[in-house]
């Protein structure tokens, strides 16, 4: 009976997944495939309609295997949002570069990460779910606090402020303002499909304009 049970579980884990991954994966690859499947199910069906059964079917693995990695649907989606949507964005500008160049490189890096298809799809799904599902709304709020500010804008602004190069009374407010002046509009367009996507060149020109205005407004007065 034990042998039969193991064979059944291994057979289920070798089923052809809907996401097209090959069989016979190691533990890290299985975990990645489960998160891939959870992302696909969430963006297609929403959190409420998503189930461990549907995620298992999409991943090509048994539900038992899913529970070996995540003890509940809540834990699975918590990990998905934290690792895929709130994943840290790392970028260290050269201190010797002018502030405008440092900030443009930083915002360009953030745009490259935030505008990827999976992150945008997850963000659309989360926005939809938080508006109608209190449990998801609380989950996202908790994860946002746990992960801290994903974007490295605040650290950069803090460094410039402490060095006296910028006059910023409230780092958090200034960070939100800078994001809105550079990436807020383009991101809204990407999320809602209400405007044509900008080319890389157009996006950089738009961000550079917002950065110039932001820096001019925060330079120390004599």
Image (cartoon, helix red, strand yellow):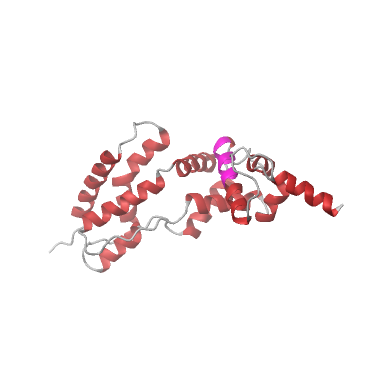
Region in magenta: 36-44
Residue 66 drawn at (x, y percent): 67, 50
Q: In this view, does 71 lie to the left or right of 118?
A: right
Which quarter of the figure has residue 46? top right
Seen from this angle, which residue lies furthest bottom?
A: 163
Residue 222 drawn at (x, y percent): 12, 64
Q: How many marks?
A: 0
Which quarter of the figure has residue 132? top right
**21 and 62: which is toward the camera:** 21
Q: In this view, does 178 lie to the left or right of 12?
A: left
Is residue 191 at all visible to an observer of this figure? yes
Residue 61 drawn at (x, y percent): 68, 45
- Residue 41 within the magenta-colored segment of the rendering: yes
Seen from this angle, which residue lies furthest left?
A: 222
Query: Which residue does the image show at 51% across and 40% down from the upper left?
Result: 125
Query: Which residue does the image show at 83% across and 49% down from the upper left?
Result: 4
Q: Is residue 82 left or right of residue 67?
A: left
Vertical placement of 78 versus 132: above or below?
A: below
Is residue 62 at all visible to an observer of this figure? no
Seen from this angle, which residue lies furthest right?
A: 1
Residue 218 drawn at (x, y percent): 21, 57
Query: Which residue does the image show at 50% across and 50% down from the upper left?
Result: 84
The kind of secondary structure the magenta stretch mainly shows is helix
Which quarter of the figure has residue 94? bottom left
**82 and 113: which is toward the camera:** 113
Vertical placement of 202 versus 149: above or below?
A: above
Vertical placement of 205 versus 78: above or below?
A: above
- Residue 100 within the magenta-colored segment of the rendering: no
Query: Which residue does the image show at 23% across and 54% down from the upper left?
Result: 101
């Amino acid at each position: 009976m034990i042998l039969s049970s193991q064979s059944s579980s291994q057979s289920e884990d070798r089923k052809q997944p809907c996401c097209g991954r090959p069989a016979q994966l190691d533990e890290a690859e299985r975990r990645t495939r489960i998160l891939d499947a959870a992302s696909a199910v969430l963006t297609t069906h929403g959190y409420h309609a998503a189930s461990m059964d549907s995620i298992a079917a999409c991943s090509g693995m048994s539900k038992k295997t899913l529970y070996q990695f995540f003890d509940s649907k809540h834990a699975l989606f918590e990990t998905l949002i934290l690792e895929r949507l709130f994943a840290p964005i790392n970028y260290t500008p050269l201190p010797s570069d002018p502030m405008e160049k440092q900030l443009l490189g930083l915002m360009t890096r953030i745009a490259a990460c935030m505008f990827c298809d999976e992150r945008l799809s997850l963000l659309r799904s989360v926005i939809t779910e938080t508006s109608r599902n209190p449990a998801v709304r609380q989950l996202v709020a908790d994860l946002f606090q746990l992960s801290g500010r994903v974007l490295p804008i605040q650290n950069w602004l803090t460094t410039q402020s402490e060095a006296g190069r910028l006059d910023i009374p409230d780092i958090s407010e200034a960070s939100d303002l800078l994001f809105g002046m550079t990436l807020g509009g383009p991101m809204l367009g990407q999320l809602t499909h209400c405007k044509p996507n900008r080319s890389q060149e157009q996006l950089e020109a738009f961000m550079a304009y917002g950065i110039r205005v932001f820096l001019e407004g925060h330079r120390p007065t004599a």
